[in-house]
Image (cartoon, helix red, strand yellow):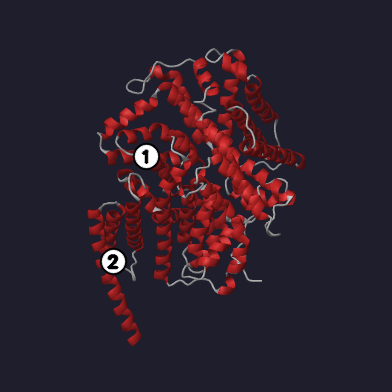
């Protein structure tokens, strides 16, 4: 049997199952979780089985709601959140000291999590009738829900989001003491509690709506695809297609991590799952450790901007903007392709500069065998994309995607989702979603305060005045805010906050709605590779055994296209296929690809051969001209790129002739 990317250079793919039903692998999983920064309890077998049963029931309930029938919106969201909170308090300890037991206060939190959901389900009609006049028990349940959501977010995501939400709650309560633009009359505790728990603009707002309706189903879809071997098949396919070319492992990492990122929706999880074997492979053919880590971090971070899934934030975007999700996919497609194309070119140029070769045929997976394994599993992602483009709702597309994956897995014995594998996938999907659900509930608290106090409009007016109606300055301020918040918040939570606060500013300044929201989305995703707090790069550095800051700088350079493209499509939305014809879009695509060639050559200092600093600067300017759609800029950019390419091609030929003659 031929070696695969799993066993070259002694690398080993980690167990992708988070399922607690697989008892014998638990010690190994705990070490992996600690290495990846997840503080998950190591429970006794009875408690492990309890959490597994709850997680499977959670997934079954969600799939039934997505594909068969669902309760009224508020009841469904309440059950959804209660399931997630119960799992959080069973799986995530208060402190490290509680990692091997569940103390009594966590059992109280579990009971409270059940109570806040059951209260809405049982008293639903009464709550509707007395809306605006809550009684004492209503207020107690609201306060309990706020506390549980904040604590669940702290345990799963850290302190950042919890502290931000706490600051917003204090702002709502004590706004009368804040002077100037952002002051307000203040709101009573009763009014704040009612806003957070009993309206669709608080905890059970748009964020929980998206996780409860279709994001959870997409997460289960990813878990089932992984359990059937889809993740491994995609990586093997990437290696089989690109591994024999120069720098092949790096190109395979770009393709494979991009495919995996569209499923996982998390750059950090993507680095952790694929980096443990792509990074050693890159090092084995000669890439420097820091560069190898940077490639993995950049490729993994781009998974969230690549259609069709694009993580949870894109679904929230569809709800917040009113733009159909299939239309958002169309808008986002070209910039995402250009991003990955730029990384692909840069790893190729780096390999050319370093004289690196690809892997041998014996080291690579057999292409025919890999296609046999992956062709059926590709039906799920392709089917979802087709359904979204045909106008299916994300809820139905995700549900049918799950069915497609299950049916496709049955065609081969090694991919078949047997009952144990299916249960494991349902369990893994539910447990993988709880952190996002907790963060979404807390983000709903922030949005509830914004809606209650009107601070969103005040923030918009402030930025407009500060920027003095200068669009580029407003875009720069929004970028800085996105990156800073993105360093401590998950992408979905960040997008909800800035989509509420900052996007209206850009829209007021003439940026189309889709372009404004995608601008925020891009920089929220790229915070993971932005120094000094580049978490994905630091994880990749740990795997690569490289210096963290060097890895972060390489990841930032490789991701630079994602920092330029949002400014370009915000100013000229033709890049998003907005207000343009099919012919114009084809022309824009061609010129943008040429611009990416120039950008990659500029950043890596290579065009047929190594090039000097002056030519790198000239190529960078030409790249910007080409990426900005417009006949004048395209003409100047093409002339500059052609002249530089001809010059270096001619000189490369002369160097080869002299080398041959010698």
137 versus 467 height, above or below: above
Q: Vertically, is 400 above or below 13?
A: above
Q: Residue 499, percent across and down?
A: 42, 35
Furthest residue to the bottom? Answer: 661
90 on left or right of 483: right
Q: Residue at x 29, y 54 (%)?
A: 624
* Visible residue check, residue 15: no
Residue 402 vertical position relative to residue 647 in the rendered view, above or below: above
- Please report the residue visible at 50 percent of the width from the left and 19 percent of the height from the top: 192
Count the marks: 2
Q: Is residue 588 visible?
A: yes
Which residue is identified by label 1? Answer: 516
Tell which of 585 and 282 is nearer to you: 585
Q: Which residue is tagged 2?
A: 612
Q: Residues within 10 Å of mark 1 (few under 14, many from 20)?
A: many
**How many C-alpha atoms fall within 10 Å of the one at disc 2: few (<14), some, or many (≥20)?**
few
Give the quadrant of residue 280: bottom right
Instruction: Look at the numbered disc 2 and give the secondary structure of its residue.
Output: loop
- Indicate the quadrant where residue 5 lies: bottom right
SS at mark 1 in the image: helix
Proximity of marks 1 and 2: CB atoms separated by less than 8 Å:
no
Q: Nearer the viewer, residue 336 or 601?
A: 336
Residue at image point 71% right, 41% down: 52
Q: Is residue 415 left or right of residue 276?
A: right
Q: Position of residue 256 (x, y in %)?
A: 53, 58
Q: Position of residue 230 (x, y in %)?
A: 61, 55
Where does the C terminus fall, quadrant-wise? bottom left
């Amino acid at each position: 049997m031929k070696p695969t990317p799993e066993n070259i250079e002694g690398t080993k793919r980690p167990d992708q199952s988070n399922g607690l039903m697989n008892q014998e692998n638990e010690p190994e999983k705990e070490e992996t979780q600690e290495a990846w920064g997840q503080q998950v309890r190591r429970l006794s077998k009875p408690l492990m089985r309890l959490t597994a049963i709850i997680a499977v029931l959670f997934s079954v309930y969600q799939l039934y709601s997505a594909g068969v029938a669902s309760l009224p919106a508020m009841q469904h969201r309440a059950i959804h959140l209660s399931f997630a909170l119960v799992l959080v308090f069973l799986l995530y300890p208060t402190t490290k000291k509680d990692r091997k037991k569940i103390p009594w206060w966590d059992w109280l939190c579990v009971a409270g999590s059940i109570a806040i959901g059951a209260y809405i389900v049982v008293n639903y009609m009464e709550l509707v009738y007395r809306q605006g006049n809550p009684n004492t028990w209503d207020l107690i349940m609201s306060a309990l829900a706020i506390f549980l959501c904040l604590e669940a977010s702290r345990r799963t995501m850290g302190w950042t989001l919890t502290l931000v939400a706490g600051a917003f709650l204090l702002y709502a309560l004590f706004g009368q003491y804040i002077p100037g633009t952002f002051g307000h009359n203040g709101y009573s505790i009763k009014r704040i509690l009612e806003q957070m728990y009993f309206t669709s603009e608080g905890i059970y707002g748009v964020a929980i709506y998206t996780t409860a309706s279709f994001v959870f189903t997409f997460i289960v879809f990813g878990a089932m695809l992984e359990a059937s071997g889809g993740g491994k098949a995609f990586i093997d396919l990437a290696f089989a297609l690109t591994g024999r070319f120069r720098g092949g492992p790096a190109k395979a990492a770009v393709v494979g991590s991009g495919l995996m990122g569209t499923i996982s929706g998390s750059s950090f999880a993507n680095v952790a799952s694929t980096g443990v074997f792509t990074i050693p492979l890159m090092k084995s053919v000669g890439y420097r450790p820091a560069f190898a880590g940077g490639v993995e971090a950049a490729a993994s971070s781009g998974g969230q901007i690549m259609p069709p899934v694009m993580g949870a934030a894109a679904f929230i975007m569809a709800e917040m903007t009113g733009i159909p999700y299939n239309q958002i996919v169309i808008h986002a497609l070209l910039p995402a392709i250009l991003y990955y194309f730029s990384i692909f070119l840069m790893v190729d140029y780096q390999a050319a500069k370093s004289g690196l070769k690809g892997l041998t045929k014996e080291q690579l997976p057999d292409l025919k065998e890999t296609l046999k394994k992956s062709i059926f599993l590709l039906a799920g992602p392709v089917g979802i994309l087709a359904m979204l483009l045909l106008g299916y709702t994300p809820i139905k597309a995700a549900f049918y995607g799950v069915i497609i994956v299950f049916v496709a897995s049955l065609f081969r014995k090694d991919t078949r989702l047997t009952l144990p594998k299916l249960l494991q996938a349902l369990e893994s999907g539910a447990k993988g979603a709880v952190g996002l659900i907790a963060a979404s509930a807390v983000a709903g608290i922030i949005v509830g305060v914004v809606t209650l106090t009107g601070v969103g409009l005040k923030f918009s007016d402030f930025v407009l005045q500060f920027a003095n109606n200068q669009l580029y300055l407003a875009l720069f301020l929004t970028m800085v805010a996105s990156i800073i918040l993105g360093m401590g918040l998950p992408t979905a939570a960040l997008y909800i906050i800035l989509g509420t606060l900052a996007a209206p500013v850009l829209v007021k300044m003439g940026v189309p709605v889709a372009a404004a929201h995608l601008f925020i989305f891009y920089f929220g995703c790229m915070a993971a590779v932005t120094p000094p707090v580049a978490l994905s790069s630091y994880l990749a550095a740990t795997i690569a055994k490289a210096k963290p800051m060097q890895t972060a700088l390489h990841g930032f350079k490789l991701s630079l296209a994602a920092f330029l493209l949002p400014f370009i499509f915000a100013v000229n939305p033709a890049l998003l296929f907005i207000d343009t014809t099919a012919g114009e879009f084809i022309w824009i695509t061609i010129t943008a690809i040429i611009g990416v060639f120039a950008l990659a050559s500029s950043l890596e200092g290579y065009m047929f051969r190594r090039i000097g600093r002056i030519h790198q600067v000239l190529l960078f300017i030409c790249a910007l001209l080409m990426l900005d759609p417009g006949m004048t800029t395209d003409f100047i950019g093409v002339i500059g790129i052609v002249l530089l390419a001809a010059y270096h091609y001619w000189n490369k030929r002369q160097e080869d002739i002299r080398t041959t003659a010698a």
